[in-house]
Image (cartoon, rainbow, N blue to C red):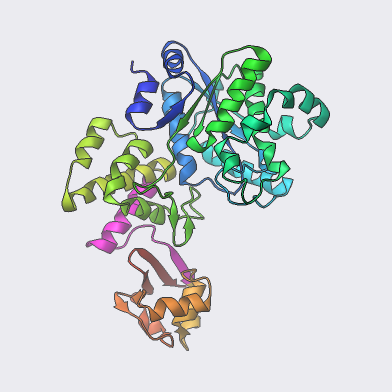
Amino acid sequence: MENVFDMLQDRGFIKQATYEDDIRELLGKEKVTFYIGFDPTADSLHVGHFVQAMVMMHMQKAGHRPIVLLGGGTAMVGDPTGKTEMRKLMTQETIAHNAECFKKQLSRFIDFSDGKAIMVNNADWLLNLNYIEFLREIGRHFSVNRMLTAECFKSRMEKGLSFLEFNYMIMQSYDFLVLNRKYGCNLQLGGDDQWSNIIGGADLIRRVDSKPAFGMTFRLLTTSTGAKMGKTEAGAVWLDPEKTSPYEFYQYWRNVDDADVEMCLSLLTFIPMDEVRNLCALEGAEINKAKEILAYEVTKIVHGEEEANKAQAAAKALFGSGSLEGSVPTTELAASEFEAGMDIMTLLVTTGLAESKSEARRLVQQGGIQLEGEKVTDIGFMVTAGSFKDGALMIKKGKKVYHQIKLS
């Protein structure tokens, strides 16, 4: 059976590893308990988290045991990594709610039956720590000089790094020690921006308990130009269907740049690499076939086969021929609202296509709005009951955003 390390490397996941040869040997000869942490800073996971979820699925399929660590404690402090300023502090209640949302979403990807995986919350051990005891037992093993060389801190020194955030690395390192002692976890995985925190934990275990511990990081979801993926005009691409509909999710992947298709197919689907390379060898318009497969496969993993089929059918109806039978975002409005007519700017705000009247005005004046394929450039344009075809009206915003209004 193929070593999961080789498979992850072939698919382009691995960026850095401590004692790479030892990790490969370990994963090839025994069942390894590993963990990935998720700080619940929002009420849904986004596509950046999904890379880590894919790693967990690959590892579990290879016979290893995942620990999903919900950061109910670390989220109280906030990871300074990648942030130009301190995160807004959240209440314990908000963090607990977000953790429950993460728990439900991750349970769709990981099999927790019969002890095949574990889910824990670091609030259980971090929130009740005695600060002085913690400093004496754990803090003494950390060199401030060495910590300041970590990229997560270096990038913040000019604008200011709070002492609160400075504790984050020690807390995450302590998580690894706790999981090692309680569950025999000896491997921490994460995004490459977590490298400093991960090696801090592995080093702590060696210093305190004289046990071997390892860390490995994976590439972040970025485009070929280095920009972070998962951002749209409407904001982040979420895994929660209430925040990003399955159709919008599908369309995001259908519209990735040609240069990013192979990376996305490798990291975000289970398609064998031979097939991935064949698909990405397509040129010109043929690469769209690979994009359609990418969009369908990622949507199927995140939202299920039924939603993937609906999203695919909707896309084909909008861009090809056939009836509209998909999950295009839809707003239902009372027919009475259109008896006297509704101006286009009010309609755009009501449907969420614009956040304000000023944004709606800009969209219309710049030619960014179409109704049933006809461009609307007059901010005084009135939408009436006669604008609807069979009780439905399709709005197009820009080149890729579609929204349907149905009369109720």
Residue closer to the observer: 203 or 191: 203
In this orientation, does residue 68 appear? Answer: no
* Horizontal arrangement in the rendering, residue 170 relative to residue 251 (left or right): right
- x%, y% of residue 225? 35, 49
- x%, y% of residue 83? 58, 48
Residue 73 lies in quadrant: top right
Verify whether residue 262 appears in magenta. Answer: no
Residue closer to the observer: 360 or 211: 211
Residue closer to the observer: 292 or 152: 152
Q: Quadrant of the N terminus?
A: top left
- x%, y% of residue 168? 66, 37
* Horizontal arrangement in the rendering, residue 398 relative to residue 33 (left or right): left
- x%, y% of residue 231? 45, 54
Start and end of the magenta stretch? 305-332
**In percent of the image, x 59 and y 44: which residue is there?**
101
266 shown above or below 34: below
119 shown above or below 354: above
Verify whether residue 330 appears in magenta. Answer: yes
